[in-house]
Amino acid sequence: MVIYKLVLNVQSINNFLEVVVVVVVVVVVVVVVVVVVVVVVVVVVVVVVVVVVVVVVVVVVVVVVVVVVGVVVVAVVVVVVVVVVVVVVVVVVVVVVVVVVVVVVVVVVVVVVVVVVVGVVVVAVVVVVVVVVVVVVVVVVVVVVVVVIVAADLEVTIVALLLQARVKFNTKTKTPALIQRVWTRCIT
């Protein structure tokens, strides 16, 4: 019965550790996904702001050039500005793609490391629990065996002393001396 209860306790601890592992992994994945989403949103906002600023600057420059210089220079400036804007947009898109790829790789590595570390910890805890249960069972068995042996030896000794007392019973006294000694020895 004791061993059955100990096995049930080990199974309960193992089930609890499995739940803890699942919860930890889910929390880590959720946190990583939130971080990735925040990073992507920030990068997109920055790109939009840069594009809007560039467009405003281009419009202002075009207006100034049209007013001051003339149509030919305006056409050249427009072409140059368009080329610059295209280059800036391409660079920003490439940077965003690289950042997203790096973040995804880091997330995958972190999740793999967390799963491996948590798995090792769970295995270590289960091994320790099993070793403790085995040691407790062995100690209980040894104590029971020792108690049984001591009790049997004490019973044999008491029976032998009582038999001797019966043989040497002194009818002159109400409490024979040997029985009194046996009683005293049993108590002490």
Image (cartoon, helix red, strand yellow):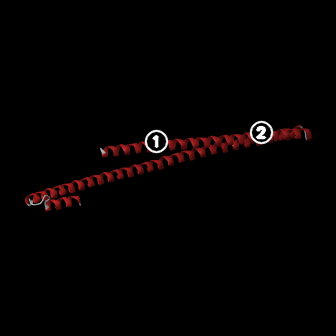
Pointer 1 residue: 19
Judged left or right of residue 70, residue 176 is left
Locate the C terminus and report the quarter of the image it occupies. bottom left
Q: Residue at x 75, y 40 (%)?
A: 51
- The residue type indicated by label 2 comes to Val
Secondary structure of the residue carrying numbered label 2: helix
Disc ID at residue 65: none
Judged left or right of residue 162, residue 122 is right
Q: Residue furthest right?
A: 68
Labels 2 and 1 touching (C-beta < 8 A): no
Disc ID at residue 52: 2
Residue 18 percent across, percent down from the top left: 44, 43
Pick whichever, 66 or 30, lies toward us: 30
Judged left or right of residue 152, residue 123 is right
Secondary structure of the residue carrying numbered label 1: helix
- The residue type indicated by label 1 comes to Val
Q: Residue at x 81, y 39 (%)?
A: 56
